[in-house]
Image: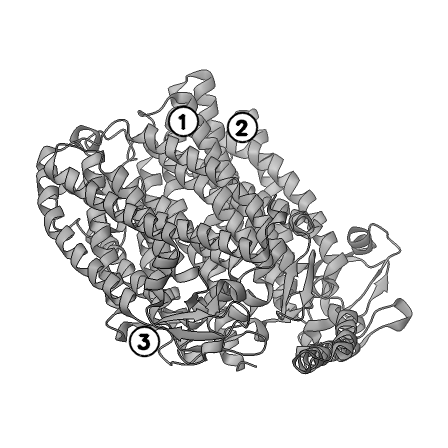
Amino acid sequence: MNELASVDWSRAQFALTAIYHFLFVPLTLGLSFLVAIMETLYVKTGDLEWKKATKFWMTLFAINFAIGVATGLIMEFEFGTNWANYSWFVGDIFGAPLAVEGILAFFMESTFFAVMFFGWNKVSKGFHLLSTWLVALGSNLSAFWILVANGWMQYPVGMVFNPDSARNEMANFFDVLLSPVAIAKFLHTVASGYVIGSLFVVGICAWFLLKKRDLHFAKRSMLVGASFGLLTSLFLTLSGDESAYQVAQHQPVKLAAMEGIYKGEHRAGLIAFAFLNPDKKIGDDLHPFIGDIEIPYLLSFLGYRNIEAFVPGLDDLVYGNPSKGVVSASERIESGKIALSALKSYREAKKEGNAALMQESHTLLTTHMPNFGYGYLDRPEQIVPPIALTFYTFHLMVSLGMWFLALFIIVLFLLMKREIMRYKPVLYAALWSVPLGYIAAECGWIVAEVGRQPWAIQDLMPVHIAATNLGSGNVMISFTLFAILFTLLLIAEIKIMVKQIAIGPDGGH
Amino acid sequence: MFELLSLLQLQQLWWIIVSLLGGIFAFLLFVQGGQTLLFSLPANETEKTMLVNSLGRKWELGFTTLVLFGGALFAAFPLFYATSFGGAYWVWLAILFCFIIQAVSYEYRKKPDNFLGTKTYECFLYLNGSLGVLLLGIAISTFFSGAAFHLDENRFVFWDNPLRGLEALQNPFNYLLAFTLFFLSRIGAGLYFINTIDHDALHVKIKTMLRSQTLLFLLFFASFMGWILTKEGFAYDPLTKVVMIVPYHYANNFAQMPWVLALFCLGVCLVVFGVLRTLFSTSKTSIKPFGVGVVLTVMALFLTVGLNHTVFYPSLSDLSSSLHIENASGSFYTLTTMSYLGLMIPFVVAYIAYAWYAMNREKITEAEMNDSSQHHY
């Protein structure tokens, strides 16, 4: 087993890379479609104002895209560099979506990206427009494949464990591809990208309107951004509901942490707002919140589509609740240790050529395989993720999502009434909502990834087993180098972006 | 269709695909080679901008191929992915750092208020083209020279050298492939510039550069081939899977797989033909035979180190931990599924070729670089 510090540095490095990467990905996902819509309007109407708008947003898209590519490269290879044990244990399943992402999505993006930016006078209008749409499609396809891989880590399906190779092997590609968790994750994530792209366009247009510059361009772009934002915000809400439903079905510990539930109950309410009680511990009788606003029955309904449903709390999941059919973590740890021991027996029997013992061990291993990862844990409390971080980021994400929906409605209403210029607070709100979009997206990822700790692969492999045996010194240095480099590049990106926005749609490509 | 193949045939098929990707990636390194010429080749800023823009329209293809190369290795040979990337940590991270700085440099170099300054981004491009390529060459050379690691019963990797991959820099033979790739990439860049940029003065300078770089390339390439053809190789018994050291194993592989030898010879001839044709005629399209030649040559080298019961990632500290296509590969099901998905590759190649053709019909000119309504790097 690796020393804890090395694992923690690897986690920190992956978190750093993922957080930086996801500062750029959502804008690529959202802005690519917005640019494609604007170019379509140009091609359809022949109106050069739309071409000007397309080129302006395209310039900002390129600045963002470049750094997204840079951070994305690292993420793919970090599975190998920092999570080598994981890469072997599930590489047979996890590697395929990454390879397909390369074949189907990355080449589409990179090939047509060049046409999109340099092809205005080299290819026909139609081919150029097709290229722009293909960049948008490629970006979203890329998101699909990587989220299939991520969805599989949250809810591993479509595989069997091979004791001879000591790894999981794919048994059904379509189970992996069409896993309900993966689909929900994909839809919710790309929807968040569309909303951020819309917030970005609406926010920058608000800045132009506040500065009383390029008014015609700004109002047109804002209309496209707000319309797209409203539609995708509604979709974001629906996909968020489905995503939470899948969490309830497959990751009850995460759901309990998201909602701060310690003692499970029927007709559980949804916590709309609360402060966690810092003295609260698993298994004690303290109240989990210091003041809270709860919407009755809603959690049971959203999580299980039934207001009578029992929602297990952390106490139930850690210590068990036989009356509700909830198995304790201790029992699962015991079962996991039997699985590990059976694997060892299987190997020894194979070496000795003892077919009967091999068969017996294999049967035992298969029986206890669902708890395999628990065998690496020592205490039942280890299955609980950081509650405060999961709880607050979840609630912040949901609140911001609601705010974005309201903002798009207000902006669209005022644009339709041609009164947007009169409501400066709305314009300021739109402008300041741009960073809020990024905060919401990062919160979403923190909920998804921190909320599933200690698992690298749900129930199969905890992070301290998944990590490469590196030693903390090596990862500490690489973490520091990444932090410095990414921060420098982020500063450069923001400065360039701000300058290009200030230059406006009439100059500088 | 692919279900009818045996596991070994699928493993061989995927090694061939990985080898092809390696060949394509080696060809696309011309972008890196071009980046190392940015400080020496152009006489003024306009010429430099022409070079950068010429490369800038292709850098993403190389970058994407690198990502696909990694993804294909992860999917088809996950034990190699886990062992090499997790073990030789610092070499791979150094390579990745070189590629991160490339990704932003084209777009940010000339943008106003770019924080780090134009020169810094140009230095980033130079670093990517020089250090990045040299390190890649050294990392790939360990396929022949080996690395110090062992695997435990779960096949989790343990690296037996505290330098975590940087120890490969201490083996002088690894530099032979590194510099071979470095000079090859510069030759590729020269041919690509001649093909895509309409500028007589640049063409003259490029031809002068090609002479010296070709001589250096041939020197290192011949040395590299001399080394691998005379050295002991790592092979495994097809029945017992026991790994052993075999004299002249790579030379034997060429002899025992004449089709690989034919690919290799054809590839080398096309590379030489591409260069000579450019030097001694007015042809501007020699990047095509040169490119095919690079792909075939590099592919043949990968095939030599992976097929015919050859260990492609030898362990110097525990021979039995060495990796070959049979013990490092994905399962039968995954390789079969991936093979079906791989049927889309010709379609992908077709649209890349079409887009390349459409974009290169008109050459890059000074006039285009001075047109402010266009997107430039």
> Closer to the camera: disc 1 or disc 2?
1
Both labels 2 and 3 in a single chain: no
Q: Mark 1: which secondary structure?
A: helix
Q: In which quarter of the image is residue A504?
A: top left
Q: In which quarter of the image is residue A131?
A: top left
Q: In which quarter of the image is residue A485?
A: bottom left
Instruction: Calculate the distance from the C-alpha at mark 1 to the C-alpha at mark 2.
Output: 30 Å
Q: Mark 3: which secondary structure?
A: helix
Q: Name the residue under label 1.
A: A128
Q: Residues within 10 Å of mark 3 (few under 14, many from 20)?
A: some
Instruction: Calculate the distance from the C-alpha at mark 2 to the C-alpha at mark 3.
Output: 64 Å
Instruction: Calculate the distance from the C-alpha at mark 1 to the C-alpha at mark 3.
Output: 49 Å
Percent of width and height locating residue A137: 51, 37
Percent of width and height locating residue A357: 76, 79
Given the image, what chain letter belongs to the residue carrying mark 3? Answer: B
Q: Mark 3 points at which residue?
A: B167
Q: Do the residues labelled 1 and 2 touch (CB within 8 Å)?
A: no
| Number of the label disc, if any, that sits on residue A415 | 2
Q: Residue furthest right?
A: A323
